Amino acid sequence: MSELTHPLHRFIRPTVPHSTFCPGCGDGIVAQSILRAIDELGMDLDDFVFVSGIGCAAWIPSPLFNADVLHTTHGRPIAFAFGIKAGLPDKKVMVVSGDGDLVAIGGNHLIQNARRNADLTVLCINNGIYGMTGGQAAPTTPMGVRTTTTPYGTFENPFEDISAMVIAAGASFVARWTTAHPRELTRSIKKAIQRKGFSFIEVLSQCPVQFGRKAGLSGAVQMIEDYKKRSLLAREAGKLGPEERKGRIVVGELVEMDKPEMFEEVQKMKARAEGGVS
Amino acid sequence: MNEKRVQSGRYFMMGNVACAEGAIAAGCEFAAGYPITPATEIANTLAERLPKVGGAFFQMEDEISSIAAVIGASWAGKKAMTATSGPGISLMLENIGFAIGVETPCVIVNVQRGAPSTGMPTIGIQGDMVQAKHGSHGDYQIIALCPSSPQEMFDHTVLAFNYAEKYRTPVFVLSDAFVGHMREEVTIPEADRIERVYRKIPAPGTDPLEIKGFLDEDVAPMPIFGQGFKAHVTSSCHDEVGKRNLIDISALDKFIRKLSNKILKHRDEITLVEKDYEGAEVVLVSYGAVARAARAAALRAREEGLPVGTLRLITPWPFPSEEIEKMARTAKQVIVLENNLGQMYPYIKAEAAPFSQVSFLPPRWVGEIHDPEHILTKIREVLR
């Protein structure tokens, strides 16, 4: 009798025997959604270069995915990805990292590359906390939550809508889902991979160990239930007033538009330069 | 392509422009940077010239992303560079350490300016000499070149790319505002007279599980992206195949030593000095723009019958300790000349002091190139 193997196991680096995620972590759900999207598109991991920063979510592609992977310094994966895409325009370059990495220390690279509409797919796994370093407050931690660096409760307004910021900066595709929406997430990742331009997907993901315990939530299941309860489809959200939307998570594909993509514009610029036309 | 990479000919050219031409001649395809005085002409020239030969210059949001993009492009298989000045280098240092850690060929030009902090942008000093070696955290070796003329801005930039590709490491060109903005005759040789080195990569189709792409003191083949090598590249402590190891200190020890030894083992092939001290009792040791003044002072001293020679460090890093010792064994007096308060001086003194008297001479004001007359006064003083 042959051993049962997971249908996506072929995408896992053969030298990696296990993941490093805590029990109940949402990163596994996200990893599966990414690999399922690639599988359903009939693509191969050699069609991709993955780039990640520092933090728990950065360890999704590094070392799990059996592909070219660059595991970079904290906050900078999008900037590294920019250079990779410039050098390998035919490859899909996907950044997978956390909210602390992409929105706090790396915020400017996120904004500027959304503005450029550079052809990158960026997955921001938002768990609302610094998990790897032991539960410090992030710019996404809700007001008042006790963390290891805010033992009397946070006193800063959090980013309540990262996706809105990325939309304002100019990204051509932006979606938000939670780990309670793995199928919808997979669908949006497929779309993000296929689209030209800066595609940003925010995934709210539970961290039961460093966030849940501190926020008074009992565990992963309860946190996913909470996501389900609070989620509100974008097309429904428009019908509600601000009071009714309070505390809800607006999910769905928030923006999808066509606009000039930077690396295509670079090709046009090169043609102008080579033709001697200024 | 309408234009040639190598614009062979004789020119009256600015040092920074010569640097950009050297990069293009060496095969640079990708450059990223952020505007900063006194390095901006390098970016301007690359922005104009690279697209005409199939490459491109990208103006990034800061120097952090500039060096990150350069490293990314290098992993995509491109020869890549950035050019900046001290404040930009300060921002790049973390990622320069990353480039060392994952063995990324790239060239970093630092057109040094009045410092610390925002300092005095149009004045050249040699203020970042030790930063290049020790600025990023941890133990590591670096290769740096110190041009002293626009011609050398061209030559050293070509050499920097060749060293970067050969040893899979970032290489500094440590220029300054004087050399960067200086205009002199520059000869760009014929294309076939310029040596161009390209990094080793694994043979196409190599089984990814057979590739040892890291930590070889004789330089591992670089498993560049997009070739199916399935490279796992992390600057966290890793082994020869790139596998992260964060628990075993013997792996850390190996990670540190192999990276360092990769440069030190080849120090003799890398080190370049210019020496003219046969029979000299006094040897002037200098580098970069200051070497021009040292040369002028030595020639004038000899006209007066004074036994004065020169030693110029073309590669301050890896530190040419053997060359310093060799010189100190024949000299009675060593005078170290730098346009700073003594950055290389402690290193030179440590090698030379057992064999000769060593002293330091800054310019009258940090920020000027030494007046040869000022050097002559010092020579007469030590010979008294």
Image (spheres, coloured by chain):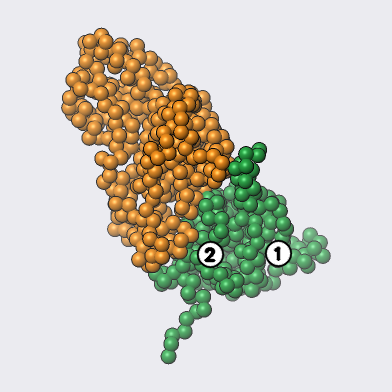
Residue carrying label 1: A253
Q: Chain of mark 2?
A: A
Left or right, B39 with respect to B217, comes to: right
- Identify the image quadrant of the N terminus of chain A: bottom left
Residue carrying label 2: A47
Left or right, B59 with respect to B98, comes to: right
Estimate how packed mark 2 is, as few (under 14), some (14 to 19) or many (20 or more) residues with alpha carbons within 10 Å: some
* Disc number for residue A181: none
Chain letter, colour orange: B
Q: Chain of mark 1?
A: A
Element marked by disc 1: strand
Q: Position of residue A166 (x, y in %)?
A: 67, 54
> Does residue A204 appear in the picture of this structure?
no
Q: Position of residue B27 (x, y in %)?
A: 45, 43
A37 or A202, which is in the foreground?
A37
Q: Residue at x 43, y 39 (%)?
A: B191
Q: Is residue B355 above or below residue A228?
A: above
Element marked by disc 2: helix
A273 or A82, which is in the foreground?
A273
Task: Indicate the colour of chain A.
Answer: green
Q: Residue at x 37, y 41 (%)?
A: B195
Q: Residue at x 55, y 51 (%)?
A: A86
Q: Position of residue A110 (x, y in %)?
A: 60, 51
User: What kind of residue is marked 1?
Assistant: Glu
User: What kind of residue is marked 2?
Assistant: Asp
- Identify the image quadrant of the C terminus of chain A: top right
B298 or B97, which is in the foreground?
B298
Q: Position of residue B250 (x, y in %)?
A: 29, 58
Q: Nearer the viewer, mark 1 or mark 2?
A: 2
